Image (cartoon, rainbow, N blue to C red):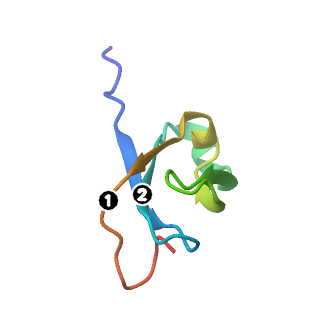
Amino acid sequence: MATPTRERRRDPHRCKACGTAFEVTYFDDRRDARSELPPVLADVPCPRCGKTKSVTVPAGAERTLVIEPGGEVSETGGGG
């Protein structure tokens, strides 16, 4: 049986301190009973100024976080 291809999920954010847009990417590998686990908070640093921000990710995904500069942040909700 073939293993499904892992795809990174991308969540856009903006640093409230310096205004830099960045993306938090992670693997969401929840399967079976793991999909019922509650999301967790993870602290991520701004790639420009280093100020930390708490983001919510699926349980287990906090171990695969990557912070990437850039990205489009919607002006209406989310990513704040």
Of the numbered discs in the image, which one, if any, rests on residue 49? Answer: none
Q: Nearer the viewer, residue 64 or 66?
A: 66
Q: Is residue 60 left or right of residue 64?
A: right
Residue 22: image quadrant is bottom left
**Contact between labelled residues 2 and 1, with CB atoms less than 8 Å apart:** yes
Give the SS element for disc 2: strand
Q: Nearer the viewer, residue 8 or 74?
A: 74
Instruction: Characterize the local packing of mark 2: few (<14), some (14-19) or many (20 or more) Cα atoms within 10 angstroms.
Output: many
Q: Which residue is mark 1?
A: 71
**Residue type at the position of mark 1:** Gly
The CA span between labels 1 and 2 is 5 Å
**Residue type at the position of mark 2:** Phe
Which residue sits furthest bottom? 76
Q: Which residue is mark 2?
A: 22
Q: Residue shown at 54%/35% (left/top)?
A: 64
Q: Is residue 1 above or below residue 12?
A: above
Q: Is residue 69 left or right of residue 55?
A: left
Q: Is residue 20 left or right of residue 37?
A: left
Percent of width and height locating residue 63:
62, 35
Q: Is residue 4 above or below residue 24?
A: above
Give the SS element for disc 1: loop
